[in-house]
Amino acid sequence: MKKVAVLTSGGDAPGMNAAIRATVRSCIHYGIEPYGVYEGFKGLVENNIHPLTRTKVSRIINRGGTMLGSARFPEFDEEKYQLQAVENLKALNIEGIIVIGGDGSFKGALALSKHGIFTMGIPATIDNDIAATEYSIGFFTALDTAVDSIDKLRDTSFSHQRCSVVEVMGRHCGDLALYAGIACGSEFIITPETGFDRQRTIDAVKSSFERNKRHAIVVSTENMTDVAQLARDIEEETGHESRATVFGHVQRGGDPQAFDRVMATEMAERAVELLKNYDSSKVIASKGKELVNIPIREALQMVKEIPNKRYGLVGQLKN
Ligand code: F6P
């Protein structure tokens, strides 16, 4: 394999840069020419493809975001765009591509492989919602950001004897809320996996204040409920002032923490190694301390397991 391209797609995630860097450096190691596709699949269709060098990826391992840019481009489901992308790659004699992103991005990679391009997928999203991998690049950094912010909210909640209702990202996956909620000793955690029960949430906060706690924290995944309204309801029923805070896109930014950098580096090294041997259509996934290669088609059909033990720990699924 003489030339390999790399692209980042979907919501950016801290650690994507580390994966780009490792792709480039591994390619150079094997005598493969690395190319960067800028602005995700949209850039691929628009032929925004340029050579990358060792120095172009210097000083990015510690940086959040993605130096290549990212985009959501649902139009890539259409074959005419896929064929245009393949034509662009073939014109540059690029045989292989590494797609860094989530399930949607892997669908794009699969489409490319159907048209003769050798592809690899690297899971990167703060949501940790990719069933094939235990952890995705960016999740732990976003988690640290959420935990750090909740710790700050706790200071002010404690001072004012308030309840803080916090909304974290995650789309349809509760991992960010669950892990952040446990790490911060929250009173109640609301996730898509547990569902939302307004009265149970209020009762949990009430009983915490009854035990003479000075503050309470409720952590919710986005799209579960109107957290501002929930804060008003808690205030009305408990008599304690309550405030809602939505962390939003802040969780997607920031320098990647060490584990995300290590995982990104190892996954990219593996992806290049497989492409070098003309392997194709695999997702590099984390499983315990190992990395495993899962066919993209299989990865896309997998359903994320609910971590029952952890939900048991916070009592969410017990009653
Ligand atoms: O998938 C990552 C994510 O940040 C989700 O947590 C969130 O629901 C979504 O992307 C937000 O998308 P956008 O950046 O397009 O508003």
Image (cartoon, rainbow, N blue to C red):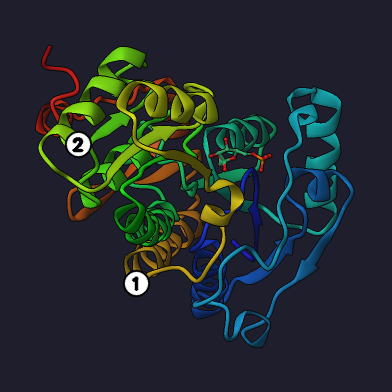
Q: Could you tell me how far apart the alpha carbons at marks 1 and 2 are, in whole angstroms? A: 37 Å
Q: Amino acid at mark 1?
A: Ala
Q: Which mark is residue 87?
A: none
Q: Is residue 283 left or right of residue 112?
A: left
x, y percent for residue 222: 50, 31
Give the residue at x 50% y 38%.
281
In the rendered structure, are the residues bearing label 1 and label 2 in contact, judged by CB atoms less than 8 Å apart?
no
x, y percent for residue 91: 85, 53
Give the residue at x 51% y 47%.
120
Q: Which-is-in-front pick, marks 1 and 2?
A: 2
Q: Quadrant of ligand 1?
A: top right
Does residue 134 appear anywhere in the picture?
no
Give the residue at x 13% y 42%.
212
Q: Quadrant of the N terminus?
A: bottom right
Q: Amino acid at mark 2?
A: Phe
The image shows residue 224, relative to residue 20, as above or below, that is above
Q: Residues within 10 Å of mark 2 (few under 14, many from 20)?
A: some
Which quadrant of the structure image shows residue 24?
A: bottom right
Give the residue at x 21% y 44%.
182
Mark 2 within 8 Å of ligand 1, using the beta carbon: no
Which quadrant of the structure image shows residue 195?
A: top left
The image shows residue 216, relative to residue 264, as above or below, that is above
Q: Which mark is residue 209?
A: 2
What residue sits right under mark 1 in the picture?
258
Q: Is residue 232 left or right of residue 267?
A: right
Mark 1 within 8 Å of ligand 1, using the beta carbon: no
Q: Quadrant of the C terminus?
A: top left
x, y percent for residue 84: 86, 38
At mark 1, the secondary structure is helix
Q: How many marks?
A: 2
Q: Is residue 177 left or right of residue 229?
A: left
